[in-house]
């Protein structure tokens, strides 16, 4: 079935051949049918003719015989009485007979019916060429004899029937001739007894092969003047005998109608015929139809068959073409569905795979521009997937518009797109990527919503950056990740990224077991006020792995965030730090705040606050002694949720501190609506405080913002007395940095506290 579906035209061809064969079979059987039909009709016709003729002739013979005998036995053989008898005979069937004549055995005509009075009848039948033969025959025969058909002027065509009238000793005393009028008699023989114009019926005298009578053809006077070809006729009789399976003699006695075929007109025309012999009166009845007629009839039938065949084939062709087209379209659709993305109509990953495999196989250099929207997640989360879908469709449209003929934009997944290009020149690639980014700069409009979404592009080249789709996609993805760090930028893949990527991969693998292997521990960095008194500590996580050594949190925390490990790690940090600090405070009798760094994913875990409260209570710490350091990254998330949760945290009396302030993008209005207690000036500003004037201005403005909003301001990363002095000048009241203390293990912090008390 599958094969047939695939070869629909083969099926059509088979059906065409099958119907053609059927047509030929039908035509052939029709041909046989026509032959049989007309064969049977001719057979019946000849038998009818034979029967009718024989009956008429026997009847005439009886009458002639009776009248002849009557004349012979009457006394007045040569008187008016004879004339009367002949006229009486004539009046019995006028129209059938042209007349009656009585001749002496020597052939002299001595009496005839009065209607022959003006006719030019031969005076002596034995001396006339046309009549001699049959007259002699009648003298020799006991039966009635049919003579040659000839034209009698004034009478027309006549066929003579002669009978010798004998005396008691058998000697012929007279010969009676009845002339059958062919022009009229034909009606008696043939009434309704031909098949049509195409059918010819002939009576042939077997003795001399002259035609006696013929219908169906224009048999004129000339026709009766010549005999049929003796040789040819002989051949025909032999053929008839052969067809009947009889000898010639037996055939001529059998009174059987025998079908035959023969060629006429010098072998150019074939006729189908039936012949039957009348032995008493010695003539053949033959009916013939030309093959032309058969053929014409066949052609007419064939023509109608052919019309039906052509119409049928036309309809079939139309149907098959319809099926083939539908099938082709279905296959195209399936192929398109398999290789194209439904939402955007762009080619998809399978298409990319096929194309790239071909290009890689040909060794043709090319590049992949991996494009990822910077803020797409926000659209989906805040405005629903429908809005997201419309943004993606618009994005695809823009990419398509901007693409050159040789470039193919592809949708990989979600908001990840890719442009396949044969370009590999670094400078041109940057130009092309910039062109695409420029297209995306304009707002995306969905209904009455306007979205400004940047995108980042990572570029990987074949064969430099990978030799398979997988490796190239990874390279492009790594480059894109680098680009994303800078937001809306472009990055070509570099081998260094690969190393970073691999190191990240290694970190991730080890990180999975870090908690259970007890590889984490906490350090605490003191925070002091302007008078050098300890006001709090920031809890900082440390990881020591036997293979990787000490991995700085800057490296492993982003990996933990990406791989979903941060919630667990965060729980570990808060539990450990709260317990250690609580115990230290109990032991030392001092009170100071402990600040916990809270990452975005940790904050967004569903049970974040209940878990934290439970841990604080378990540690036995005052809520007021716990501070959470959050960053501006948190505000990219669902703001309603974030604000709500921060409010709850604040209500619990827990201190909230905004870390790395000044590096993010949050606006001042955000500050106003958030329940914050503290701002932390990022260490990058403090670092440049003494050298960079703008940094010092920024620090000043952060401090004034803090005081305006009644927020405590902590300067982070204070390393020198100079920095401290400047910060104090600016009005900063709290400090953290190496100038005071490095992050300390809990035991070291314990000592630090002791030292502080002694100072
Ligand atoms: P951060 O929250 O800004 O932490 C302050 C960082 O500055 C710490 O680096 C600290 O050691 C360093 N620092 C303190 N004083 C000075 C100084 O005078 N000069 C210099 N150059 N650096 C100073 P650290 O411990 O390597 O932590 C780096 C970052 O890792 C932190 O930045 C924080 O974002 C993250 N982090 C550390 N521990 C945790 C944690 O437990 N949870 C979370 N979520 N993040 C953590
Ligand atoms: Ca911090
Ligand atoms: Ca910080």
Image (spheres, rainbow, N blue to C red):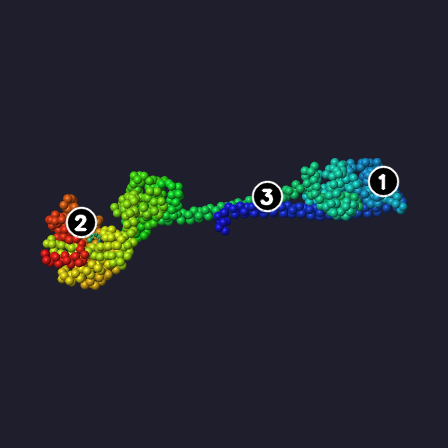
Q: Residue at x 78, y 36 (%)?
A: 153
In this rendering, does residue 670 appear at all?
Answer: yes
Between 676 and 422, which is closer to the camera in this rendering?
422
Q: Residues within 10 Å of mark 3 (few under 14, many from 20)?
A: few
Residue 230, percent from left and from top? 76, 38
- What residue sits right under mark 1 in the picture? 103
Q: Earlier in the sequence, mark 1 or mark 3?
A: 1
Classify residue 339 as left or right of residue 23. left
In this rendering, does residue 419 appear at all?
Answer: no
- Vertical side of 577 occupied by 204: above or below: above
- Vertical side of 132 occupied by 470: above or below: below
Cα distance in 3D space between marks 1 and 2? 164 Å
Classify residue 247 as left or right of residue 562. right
Look at the numbered disc 1 and give the secondary structure of its residue.
Answer: strand
- Asked if the residues shown at circle 1 and circle 3 are in contact, with their CB atoms under 8 angstroms apart, the answer is no
Cα distance in 3D space between marks 2 and 3? 102 Å
Q: Residue at x 16, y 57 (%)?
A: 749
Classify residue 254 as left or right of residue 650. right
Cα distance in 3D space between marks 1 and 3? 62 Å
Is the distance from the Cβ of mark 2 to the nearest ligand 1 atom less than 8 Å?
yes
Residue 660, percent from left and from top? 19, 51
- Vertical side of 468 occupied by 527: above or below: below
Q: Residue furthest front?
A: 546
- What residue sits right under mark 3 in the picture? 303
- Asked if the residues shown at circle 2 and circle 3 are in contact, with their CB atoms under 8 angstroms apart, the answer is no
- What residue sits right under mark 2 in the picture? 683
Residue 413, percent from left and from top? 34, 49
Q: Earlier in the sequence, mark 1 or mark 2?
A: 1
> Which label sits in the foreground, 1 or 2?
2
Residue 100, percent from left and from top? 81, 42
């Amino acid at each position: 079935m599958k094969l047939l579906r695939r070869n629909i035209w083969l099926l059509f061809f088979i059906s065409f051949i099958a119907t053609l064969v059927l047509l030929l079979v039908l035509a052939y059987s029709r041909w046989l049918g026509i032959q049989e039909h007309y064969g049977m009709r001719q057979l019946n016709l000849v038998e009818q003719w034979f029967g009718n003729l024989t009956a008429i002739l026997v009847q005439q013979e009886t009458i002639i015989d009776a009248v002849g005998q009557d004349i012979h036995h009457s006394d007045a053989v040569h008187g008016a009485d004879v004339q009367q008898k002949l006229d009486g005979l004539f009046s019995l069937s006028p129209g059938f007979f042209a007349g009656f004549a009585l001749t002496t055995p020597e052939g002299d005509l001595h009496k005839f019916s009065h209607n022959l009075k003006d006719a030019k009848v031969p005076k002596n039948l034995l001396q006339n060429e046309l009549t001699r033969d049959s007259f002699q025959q009648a003298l020799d025969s006991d039966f009635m004899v049919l003579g040659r058909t000839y034209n009698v002027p004034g009478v027309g065509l006549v066929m003579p029937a002669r009978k010798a009238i004998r005396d008691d000793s058998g000697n012929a005393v007279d010969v009676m001739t009845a002339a059958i009028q062919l022009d009229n008699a034909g009606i008696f023989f043939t009434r309704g007894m031909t098949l049509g114009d195409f059918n010819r019926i002939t009576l042939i005298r077997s003795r001399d092969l002259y035609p006696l009578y013929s219908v169906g053809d224009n048999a004129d006077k000339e026709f009766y003047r010549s005999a049929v070809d003796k040789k040819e006729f002989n051949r025909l009789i032999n053929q008839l005998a052969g067809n009947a399976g009889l000898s010639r003699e037996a055939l001529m006695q059998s009174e059987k109608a025998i079908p035959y075929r023969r060629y006429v007109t010098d072998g150019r025309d074939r006729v189908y015929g039936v012949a039957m012999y009348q032995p008493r009166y010695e003539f053949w009845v033959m009916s013939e139809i030309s093959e032309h007629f058969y053929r014409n009839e066949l052609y007419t039938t064939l023509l109608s068959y052919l019309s039906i065949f052509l119409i049928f084939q036309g309809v079939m062709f139309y149907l098959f073409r319809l099926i083939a087209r539908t099938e082709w379209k279905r296959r195209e659709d399936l192929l398109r569905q398999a290789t194209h993305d439904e939402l955007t109509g762009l080619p998809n990953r399978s298409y990319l795979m096929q194309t790239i495999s071909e290009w890689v196989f040909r060794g043709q250099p090319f590049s992949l521009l991996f494009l990822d929207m910077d803020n797409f997640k926000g659209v989906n989360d805040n405005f629903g997937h429908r809005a997201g879908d419309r943004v993606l469709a618009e994005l695809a449209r823009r990419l398509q518009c901007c693409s050159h003929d040789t470039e193919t934009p592809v949708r990989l997944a979600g908001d990840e797109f890719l442009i396949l290009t044969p370009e590999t020149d670094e400078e041109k690639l940057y130009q092309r990527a910039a062109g695409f980014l420029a297209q995306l700069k304009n707002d995306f409009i969905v209904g009455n919503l306007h979205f400004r979404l940047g995108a980042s592009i990572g570029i990987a080249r074949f064969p430099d950056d990978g030799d398979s789709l997988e490796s190239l996609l990874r390279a492009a993805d790594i480059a894109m990740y680098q680009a994303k760090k800078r937001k809306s930028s472009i990055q070509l893949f570099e081998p260094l990224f690969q190393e970073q990527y691999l190191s990240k991969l290694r970190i991730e693998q080890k990180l999975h077991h870090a908690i259970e292997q007890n590889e984490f521990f906490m350090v605490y960095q003191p925070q002091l006020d302007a008078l050098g008194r300890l006001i709090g500590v920031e809890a900082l996580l440390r990881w020591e792995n036997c293979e990787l050594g000490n991995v700085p949190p800057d490296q492993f925390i982003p990996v933990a965030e990406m791989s979903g490990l941060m919630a667990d790690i965060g729980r570990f940090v808060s539990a450990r730090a709260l317990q250690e600090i609580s115990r230290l405070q109990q032991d030392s009798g001092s009170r100071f705040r402990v600040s916990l760094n809270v990452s975005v994913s940790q904050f967004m875990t569903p049970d974040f606050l209940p878990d934290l409260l439970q841990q604080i209570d378990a540690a036995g710490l005052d809520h007021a002694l716990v501070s959470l350091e959050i960053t501006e990254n948190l505000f990219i998330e669902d703001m309603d949720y974030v604000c709500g949760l921060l409010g709850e945290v604040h209500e619990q009396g827990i201190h909230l501190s905004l870390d790395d302030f000044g590096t993010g993008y949050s606006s001042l209005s955000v500050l106003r609506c958030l329940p914050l207690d503290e701002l932390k000036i990022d260490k990058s500003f403090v670092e440049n405080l003494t050298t960079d004037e703008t940094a010092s201005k920024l620090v000043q403005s952060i401090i004034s913002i803090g005081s305006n909003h009644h927020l405590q301001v902590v300067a982070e990363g204070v390393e020198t007395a100079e920095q401290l002095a400047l910060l104090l000048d600016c009005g900063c009241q709290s400090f953290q940095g190496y100038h005071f203390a490095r992050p300390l293990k809990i035991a070291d912090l314990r000592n630090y506290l002791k030292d502080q008390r002694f100072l």
